[in-house]
Image (cartoon, helix red, strand yellow):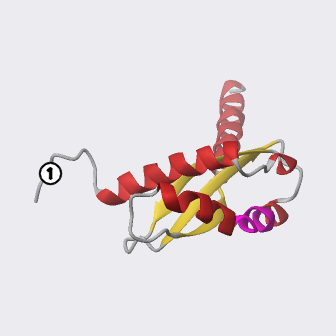
Amino acid sequence: MDHNKPYDRIDRVNNQILDILGAILHKYIDLSHLGFVTFTKVDVARDLRVAKVFYSVLNQTLPKKQLNIEINKHRKPFKKYMGPQLTMKHTPDLRFYFDDTYEYTEYVSTLIKKLKKSDNKY
């Protein structure tokens, strides 16, 4: 087995799909009515048939559930534009999920700030 590649195939496919989807979002599919949408991470299944695509939205105009429904309505157009650009036999089916990492880090930061303030009182 040749280990000259810096990471395994799944990682390369994840990065390739993330780059392609970002370009498609910029060029072909307008989701600006939902807010500023960015794709943060892609997780492709080992069989390369399904890809979980995580996104975040700044200045979102809809609640998370409705936002998820609206973005998942565009699964077929994203797959259509992505297919010719992929160097794989099959184009994976896309599933979009809201990435709440930013919100979680903000929550943890506020907890840490509260702890620091309570420590300074003593």
* Relative depth, front residue between 86 and 54: 86
Q: Residue at x 44, y 49 (%)?
A: 15
Position in image of residue 94 (x %, y %) = 59, 67
Quarter location, residue 87: bottom left
Q: Report the label total.
A: 1
Q: Nearer the viewer, residue 91 or 106?
A: 91
In the displayed image of the protein, which residue is found farthest to the front?
A: 84
Residue 6 drawn at (x, y percent): 25, 44
Query: Residue 82 in the image: x percent, y percent?
Result: 55, 58
Q: Residues within 10 Å of mark 1 (few under 14, many from 20)?
A: few
Q: Disc 1 residue type?
A: His
Q: Is residue 107 left or right of residue 22?
A: right
Q: Position of residue 77 (x, y in %)?
A: 68, 63
Task: State the residue position of label 1.
Answer: 3
Q: Is residue 69 left or right of residue 51?
A: right
Kindly identify the residue that appears in the image at 12 percent across and 54 percent down: 2
Q: Secondary structure at mark 1?
A: loop
Please tell me in which quadrant of the rendered image residue 53 appears: bottom right
27 is within the stretch colored magenta: no
The residue at 37%/54% (across/down) is 11
Above or below for 48 versus 4? below
Q: Residue reaching furthest left?
A: 1
Q: Residue at x 60, y 46 (%)?
A: 22
Q: Quadrant of the N terminus?
A: bottom left
Magenta region, mostly helix, strand or loop?
helix
Determine whether 42 is above or below 19 in the image. Answer: below
Q: Is residue 70 magenta?
A: yes
- In the rendered image, the quadrant that contains the C terminus is top right
| Segment tinted magenta in the rendering | 68-74
Q: Is residue 106 above or below residue 48?
A: above
